[in-house]
Image (cartoon, rainbow, N blue to C red):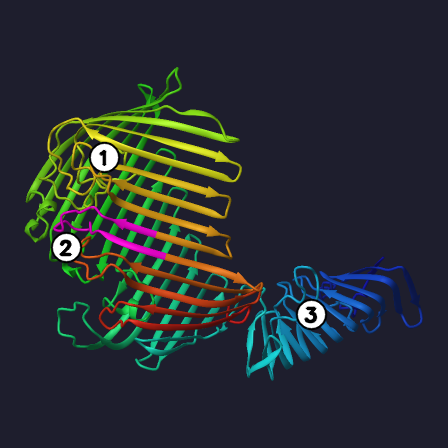
Amino acid sequence: MLLCAPSLALAQAPASAPSPAPEKERQVDFSSDTLTYDDTTEIVTASGNVQMTSEGNRLHADTVTWNRKTGEVRAEGNVRVVNPQGDTAYGDNVELTDTLRDGIVSNLLLVLADGGRLAANRAERRNGYTTLHRAAYSPCAVVDSHGCPKNPTWTITAVQVVHDPVRHRISYKGATLNLFGTPIIALPGLSHPDGTEGGGTGLLVPDIRFSRSNGLELSFPYYFKSAPNWDATITPHVYSDVLPMIEGRYRRLTELGAFQIGAYATYGSRMPIDTNLVSTSNRSFRGYLEGNGRFQLDPQWSITASGRYVTDRTFLRRYDISRDDRLRSFVNAERIDDDSYISIAGWAFQGLRVTDVAGQQPVVLPAIDARWRIGDPVLGGKIEIQANSLAILRTEGQDTQRAFASARWDHRSITPLGQELTLTAFARGDVYHASDTLLTPTPLYRGTEGWSSRGIAALAADMRWPFIGAFMGGTQRFTPRVQLVASPSTRNLSIPNEDARSVDLEDSNLFALNRFPGYDRWEDGSRITYGAEWQFDLPRISFRTIVGQSYRLSEKESILPSGTGLSDRFSDIVGRSTLKIGRRLSFVHRFRLDKDSLAIRRNEIDTVFGSRQTYATIGYLRLNRDIDPTLEDLRDREELRLGGRVKFANYWSVFGSTVVDLTNRSEDPASRADGFEPVRHRLGIGYDDDCIEIGLTWRRDYETTGDFRKGNTFLFRVALKNLGR
């Protein structure tokens, strides 16, 4: 039945005055099993499964009486009121206005749209604001996964609670936090977001930490959100052993993209990380600045930027911000469409290692790379054209400029016998300029002072021959592969080497046209590369392995240094094996064997076993390449990494990890390790359910770097849903 509220009676206006617009009639829809109407008192009584709707507000009850004179609505018996935002109020009896927005409720239960609950002995709502007396709030579930009742993990009880629908906040008077049913702490002046807007301005839950370098640390983050598209967090850090530090973070979403900026600042002492220097502290400003963002200017053009700068080398480690030992900053403008790619970028680096010299850190500006793919086939193949330009500047080191243009033609076909044959033709012309070459400590990387140029050409044929069949109830595929590459002698040593220094033969570059990692070195001569791949698949089980080697046909001495696996005519043997069993096991093994002695030159294992909640990880790396120690970026190393998490008792878990340096001086003469040197241990216990997270973590560091001292660090953290989380 549709009932219309009476319209506002209007006094008759003078003939010369315009008539005011009548108030829009408000409509109330409701249905029930029975309905009575008293003409004298103008009271409507609905009984039995009453459902009433007005302006998006819905009421359900056993009985509803409506006084059309006063506009009062009284609902009794299993009362439920739902507002347009999805919040639901339950009560024994409710007195409402005929808009169903305002009223008084006894024994209220208010279920918010995000699942949070407010319960009270008595509540009233005026103009959308809900005030509850002797109330309790919790965002936690009150039933378990089987639908059985359970006590919420945490609640806040208060003398009075006010829900502000405009600010989307819940405010308390006389509040107390109860954890697992036990009162923990009084919370005077508490207010927090109601969860409908993803959080709001307010104090977040503090973090507690203790470290050997800084002593006891308390952090008090305060969150600002004045608009849906931006927020900020200010976090003071207070320490017992050093001066305080302030941290700030700002995030913003714009019409073109998003960006964020973070900063740390303090005043304190720092020590040099070089152990050969006299250990004297220097008190000054210390800080760290970082930011990144991406903007899509139109469907093709975008700009991506990231910046990082720290005042000194040990700040990030001492205050446990990051363990990076080299910071990169860049800005990159890109244009991408179906057949072309253009990148215009600039890069800057900051080295934090002991061996890093500030004046030798490169600034790359500009770095331009453009590629075009010709859509129509040429001689049955695809052509890709590339143009590249690069300028590297150093304040106390070598400067290098480079430009080249190249063209590559690839033709793929299937022979009548089922072989996949790929033919490749490649040509490139380079122009270089280098200055201050004597400032580069490694002569092999300097190149010729001044201008130099070279031409590069190569022809290649790559054939795969897959054989597929059934095996042990599954499917197997065996694929032999042979590649022939021919390239005339190339001027390499007269060209500066900036991006092709860390050479290492592995399965990923075994069949590459150029096994050097960058553009500044080119592998010339003729060679044949051969190998095979075997793949075996069962339901939820997959195994893949590949192994291969190459042989250089020309007798010319290689420029590839000894230890890379490519210096002799026969290369070392490389391979990779991968095993996956459902989501429970992932195993990857990479190796390189010496071609003569079959000694292991590279042995790398990465495996993850278990589920998302209980798992173990194992990582092992050994590089035993015996490379000339005068070359850069090619140090041998042996390292073991272990980690894991075990979940128990539904929400509890223990977790830990360790990193052990197994390097000894026979592998790296510059290393001070004795073959078993712990680097870092971590062990913790945590509780995590749908509305609370509690964690206690212990970490021990075994390396001292400047004012970052080895020792123990303890971190205690609590995060509550809708309350600082």
Residue 190's disc number: none
Label 1 Cα neighbours within 10 Å, binned few <14 / some 14-19 / many ≥20: some
Residue 421, by quadrant, is top left
Q: Earlier in the sequence, mark 3 or mark 1?
A: 3
Mark pair 3, 2: CA separation: 65 Å
Q: Are marks 3 and 2 in contact (CB under 8 Å)?
A: no
Q: Amino acid at mark 2?
A: Arg
* Residue 410 is inside the magenta segment: no
- In front: mark 3 or mark 1? 1
Chain part drawn in magenta: 620-641
Residue 394's disc number: 2
Q: Earlier in the sequence, mark 3 or mark 2?
A: 3
At mark 2, the secondary structure is: loop
Q: Earlier in the sequence, mark 1 or mark 2?
A: 2
Q: Which residue is mark 1?
A: 514
At mark 3, the secondary structure is: strand
Above or below, comparing residue 673 to residue 574 in the picture: below
Q: How many marks?
A: 3
Residue drawn at (27%, 60%) of the image: 676
Label 3 Cα neighbours within 10 Å, binned few <14 / some 14-19 / many ≥20: many
Q: Are marks 1 and 2 in contact (CB under 8 Å)?
A: no
At mark 1, the secondary structure is: loop
Q: Which x, y percent locates residue 256?
A: 42, 52
- In front: mark 1 or mark 2? 1
Q: Nearer the viewer, residue 35 or 163?
A: 163
Q: Which residue is mark 3?
A: 110
Q: Nearer the viewer, residue 362 or 497?
A: 497
Residue 25 is at least partly visible in this image: no
